[in-house]
Image (cartoon, rainbow, N blue to C red):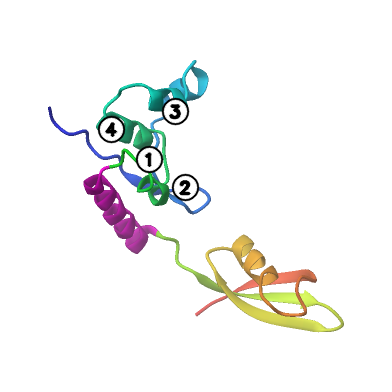
Amino acid sequence: MSKHPIQPVEYAKNGVIRFKPNAIVKYILDNGPFNMNVVELKSFSNEDKEQLTQLLGYSVSGFGDLSYASHETVEKADQMSRELDDYKKPKKKKFVITVMKTEKIEVEVEAENEHLARVAATQRPLPEFPEEIVGVRELKD
């Protein structure tokens, strides 16, 4: 019997690298009488469970922790993840965050977009945060 193909990997909206989910498989599992706990109790092969997990869009980082994930598939998925990270990860930009306390304070942060720049600014270990952010602007090279 031939081995199942490995699912491609992609960035999810939250930035996590996941296997590309199959919408039909997800629908069947989400809306049917079965769930992954039932699947785990059945005597399906590890290879079939491994592929199902990929088709459901499991995260690559968590895939290696599954008892039925083969070392070979984990290694291949990790390699695909590294390649994706090298070529498709959004590049970070520099932003200046303006905060009002008693005076105007500007702090430079690196992030992939304006929203993440605001988040990064509020997580900095500075006494002036989290105050009211009054402006965000991207620094151009």
Three-letter amino acid code at disc 1? Lys
Which residue lies under the disc numbered 2?
Answer: 12
**Mark 2–mark 4 distance (CA, rounded to whole Å):** 25 Å
Magenta span: 70-88
**Residue 18: within the magenta?**
no
Q: Give the residue at mark 4.
A: 46
x, y percentage for residue 125?
Answer: 68, 77
**3 left or right of 87 in image:** left
Q: Is residue 67 above or below residue 77?
A: above
Q: Residue furthest right?
A: 102
Which secondary structure, mark 1? loop
Dot 3 or dot 4, earlier in sequence? 3
Res 105 → quadrant:
bottom right
C-alpha gap between disc 1 and disc 4? 20 Å
Q: Position of residue 16 (x, y in %)?
A: 46, 52
The answer to whether 45 is drawn above or below residue 76 in the figure is above
Does the magenta segment cover residue 81?
Answer: yes
Read off the residue under disc 1. Answer: 20
Which of the 4 image quadrants contains residue 38?
A: top left
Task: Report which quarter residue 47 is drawn in.
Answer: top left
Query: For mark 3, what is the residue?
Result: 36
Q: Are marks 3 and 2 in contact (CB under 8 Å)?
A: no
Dot 2 or dot 4, earlier in sequence: 2
Residue found at the far left of this picture: 1
- Which quadrant is the N terminus positioned in? top left
User: What amino acid is labelled 2 in the image?
Assistant: Ala
